[in-house]
Image (cartoon, helix red, strand yellow):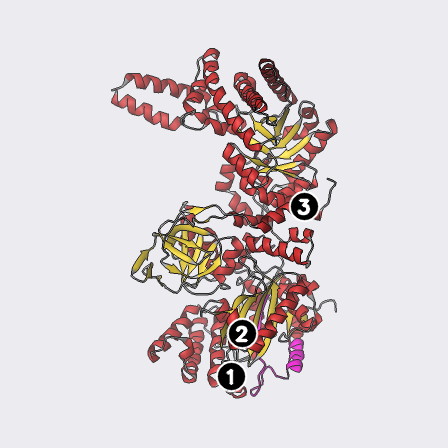
Amino acid sequence: MENKHVYMFYEGNAGMRELLGGKGANLAEMTRIGLPVPPGFTVSTAACREYFARGQVIRDELRDEVLAALKKLEEVTGKLFEDKTNPLLVSVRSGAVFSMPGMMDTVLNLGLNDQTVQGLAEISANERFAYDCYRRFIQMFGDVVLKVDHFYFEKAIEDKKRSLNVTYDTELDAAALKELVAEFKKIVSRQAKKEFPQEPVEQLMLAIQAVFDSWNNQRAIVYRQIHKIPDHLGTAVNVQTMVFGNLGDDSGTGVAFTRNPADGTKQLYGEFLVNAQGEDVVAGIRTPLDIAKMAEHLPSVYQQFTELCSLLEKHYRDVQDIEFTVERGKLYLLQTRSGKRTAAAAVKIAVNMAEEGLIDKKEALLRVDPAQLNQLLHRRIDPAHKAKAIAKGLPASPGAASGQIVFEADDAEKAAADGRKVILVRPETTPDDIHGIVAAEGVLTSRGGMTSHAAVVARGMGKCCVTGCEELKIDLTAKTVTVKDMVLKEGDIITIDGSTGEVFAGTVPLIAPELSAEFSTLLQWADEVKTLGVRANADTPEDARKAREFGATGIGLCRTEHMFMSQDRLPVVQEMILAKNEAARERALAKLLPMQQNDFEGIFRAMDGYPVTIRLLDPPLHEFLPSLEELLVEVTLLRERGDNPELLRQKENLLRQVRALSEFNPMLGHRGCRLGLVTPSIYKMQATAIFRAVVTLLNEGKSVVPEIMIPLVGHENELKLMRELVVKAAEEVMAESGKRFTYKVGTMIELPRACVTADRIAAHADFFSFGTNDLTQTTFGYSRDDAEGKFLVTYLQEKILPENPFAVLDREGVGELVKMAAEKGRSARPDLKLGICGEHGGDPSSIEFCHLIGLDYVSCSPFRVPIARLAAAQAQVKNPREK
């Protein structure tokens, strides 16, 4: 049927993900292979898209399809939807193509009303259970569908418990729950301005509509932006027969992973609650028991569950995140999906599964998101520090962080915008807190388990997180946290360790991580596969050593201007800039030369025979001088005081020179090769320092591969003259030292004209290195700082641009220029070496593009080298090219 929009679980399979959503496709697949899944049906993503296209109206044909599926569900279960004696009750859940845990809405126990609740009480022989289901249903339906703030329901529950002098919801008896049901219906009537619907079919259609609508709630939109999920996909809706975990001590509910999602260990990991409904675990309302304890409470069910977990992992060939319910000793699997995991777990699981033969090495490489490797580079608490923890919760997401306490997500976002590091402290988090979790260094909650919302979201983002820290008494009104006799206020600093669950007062020393054996294995496999080289951007020997540790096979960008900025050198640099004549400039350059030579010797030693690309001075000279504004203030004050004429004369002279050097648009002004052409002695000094460093290393018996890069070339004659200067410096050093050495001279391609005339420029170049930061600025006509500060956010929100072009290479514009330059350059010089050294060199999407157009290497910051190695390997697996 061409316009079919509703599918019974037994009609689908895992391959129908785009139509049925991830959850629906998995439920269909589990049904297909004979697992104990409560029966149900899925309303497709196509129906959701049509709903929005029709102005958020459910058409009659879709209603008819839903009712037909409901009829089939009644036949399968032997229960009737509106039956007063044995009612069919269902859950209504979202299910997007890509997993978005907790971001959209769910309604449980749908089908209950004032009559069917009595039938449920009779058939379950448990009046308290029936009315507990009914009050939960009114609360969820009221919140999700009728938009009644859950605060009103929570307050009614708290008031009822207080009046009966009880602490827990479970202590409310049937009579109390009946009274709550009546009160809840009054709340709905008052707040929603309509009566709670008693007709089950009306309940169902309203719930389906609410789940569709939740695709565009604020938290779902934010989640999609963060995880780059397209907005047009829509969500499916899964309608599934209810099974109950709250029928007594032979019932329960839980969530489990087939392997530990925090560290990747091959053991069942999860939590369950006896006599509870599913949302109690996920919402973190009660702190659950470890899954292993299920063996004591329900031994035969636990045995069956472990066998099914093994079966599911082998079937899907990946770690599974499974929700289950036990109803009176019978196990039901409510859903399975690929488990979210930390980077450490992803690496270990991928390598272990390849070693176990479940997947091959290439698939193992594709199983790890390169960007996720950033998590492995997070810091941890220094074990030598003997700080005593003030509290301990559950280790929900690894890493450690220090920051000021904030209690509200909005405050966390504001603090991060102000540059302050904060820890978000909450009783528990909800999907509405996602922006605060993004902004915070880490998350600490007093309730919830290791599969609660805070834990799942923090793990996905690589944030450290401690949950279920019940020793904390959090007062959101007073904005305090009390631990035993210690009171911490908002703004006080704490440190949390998401690997151990410990919480410390104040700042605790943190150290860099140690990478696992599996991490090394995975990157070794990546190196075996990839064809793209990976270098690092490094300006100091320390950076170069770190780059080598992370597997860089060269330096693609060494920025010499950073060497001029240290306080011991700045006066000499300023002396050189302010020299009144060439002789004075030469004297200052003579002082700088040995300093620069020492810099290059250190970097060459650290790289130990790997190529080092050194960019000659790029920024305009005024950047090394005091700011014009500061000088104006100083001169004005000195004039007013009139007590130091000599100092005033010096400052006025300096002000004149700074004014003379200042430019209207420095980015497009007197910088790069233009500086070398107008003041060649600066580039001559740098080239001489590089080649003398080469000689020193050769005398030590070491191998050196220097590559001198001329910045901001836009015309072939610029590079021709600068190459002649570098060659002359090399010949002079060879003559004075008696040592012969090889070197390369190339240019940074960062101007559109250079791309268009790349064949002419290549006549004078041994290599091109694409400076995509400036090439993006000059192609778009954006000043990066102004764009990111003023309008890029709007451009991204309004979908004018799909990505920030300074973070992800713009393939259609900047990318086409890079491709053109690569093709033109190689047409003139087939052996031309091509690389990229902008920040895009560490972005997986940009790395894939560099692979596709045939570049030789990418260069990125040292800490992104592992990301680049893995991304390069994935590009080769997906789009093989000859090595």
Q: Which amino acid type is marked by label 2?
A: Ala
**Sequence-earlier tag: 2 or 1:** 1
- Eyeballing the image, is 335 above or below 389? below
Residue in view at x 41 percent, y 22 percent: 571
In the rendered image, the quadrant that contains the N terminus is bottom right
Instruction: Magenta stretch: give its range.
Output: 67-94
Q: Which mark is residue 7?
A: none
Q: Is residue 8 visible?
A: no
User: Could you tell me residue 491's position as x and y percent?
Assistant: 34, 52
**Sequence-earlier tag: 1 or 3:** 1
Badge 2: few (under 14), some or many (20 or more) residues near its Cα, within 10 Å?
Answer: few
Badge 1: few (under 14), some or many (20 or more) residues near its Cα, within 10 Å?
Answer: many
Query: Per the image, is 611 magenta?
Result: no
Secondary element at tag 2: helix
* Residue that label 3 marks: 875
Badge 3: few (under 14), some or many (20 or more) residues near its Cα, within 10 Å?
Answer: many
Q: Which mark is residue 295?
A: 2
